[in-house]
Amino acid sequence: MIDLRKKDIFSLITNPTRNIIITRLDEAEKAAYSDLLDSTDYILPLNSTGNFNYHLNFLLKNSIITKEGIVYKLTEKGREISKYLKDIDEKWKELEKILRGGKMSILNIAEQFEEETGIIMDKEVSDFQGIEIIMDENKILGIMTLDKEHEILDTYEQLNVTDFKIIRKIGSKKVDKKNQIISVLHHPEIEYYLSPKLYGIVQDFLERNHGDSLIYANKITPAPFIISSKKIGEWRENCSFVIAPSIFDKPLKDKDQNIKNE
């Protein structure tokens, strides 16, 4: 019988750090401190290990996990709670299907994305040529719903991720009287560029929460990149992002420098 107070049980569900520690120990049976810390890295950046240690000690103090030598394990109580968390997750997935669609779905995704990445998203849904979209505060990255085919997407084609290369470009801003050097992702079939940082964040979010990430672009003219969890034609009930392209003056193309992998 679990003797935690009701609010403590709810805190396990809502607190991602505790949730991940329990899930990790359920999957691996045992894990060292460093392994558990690494497992929580993608959550909002920790200012120090103090935040992580607080949650780890909470689980130890309440006999949800135990420490044996240098490794941690779930107690019997911990295994009960892990099963409870799994049941809650399955029930949420069923409920989400009922709630999915339109503004509720896209707002929920935007809220989750902001919580996990720290990127501030607008709280209002905008309409872009019949597509509902929520942009970040810098208007560079957006989340959109693609529950049906849109004419604007007919010009998009899927790109092979392995064809991208990181190159350095000279930007318009100057740092210490020198032109700023920017690292971008370049694909041989298109004439504009993608932010490695934003693509990495979106790719990680999609693959952790939706299983896959596919990238699309308009090969004819500069247009926002689309990173989606599903293929074109299968976009119903998916999660899709747009990332504004990076565009440079043509004379600067001669100054590209491939970054060699060492």
Image (tube, rainbow, N blue to C red):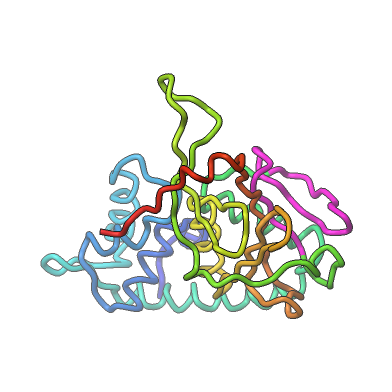
Residue 196 as seen in the image, left or right of residue 103: left
Quarter of the rendering containing residue 227 = bottom right
Residue at position x 44%, y 37% in the image: 181
Return the x and y of residue 73 as percentages of the image width and height.
25, 72
Residue 13 placement, left or right of 220: left
Q: Nearer the viewer, residue 90 or 46?
A: 46
Q: Which residues are magenta?
A: 122-145
Question: Residue placed farthest to the top in the image?
Answer: 177
Residue 121 locus on image (x, y percent)? 65, 45
Q: Is residue 141 above or below residue 101?
A: above
Q: Residue 138 sits in which quadrant? A: top right
Is 156 above or below relative to 257? below
Residue closest to the eye, 254 or 105: 254
Number of disc labels: 0
Determine the image quadrant of residue 247. top right
Confirm whether the magenta stretch covers residue 204: no
Where is residue 144? Give x, y as percent.
74, 59
The residue closer to the viewer here, 183 or 20, is 183
Q: Is residue 123 magenta?
A: yes
**What is the x, y in percent for residue 112?**
60, 56
Q: Residue at x 83, y 59 (%)?
A: 131
Which residue shows up at 84% across the image and 72% down it? Answer: 149
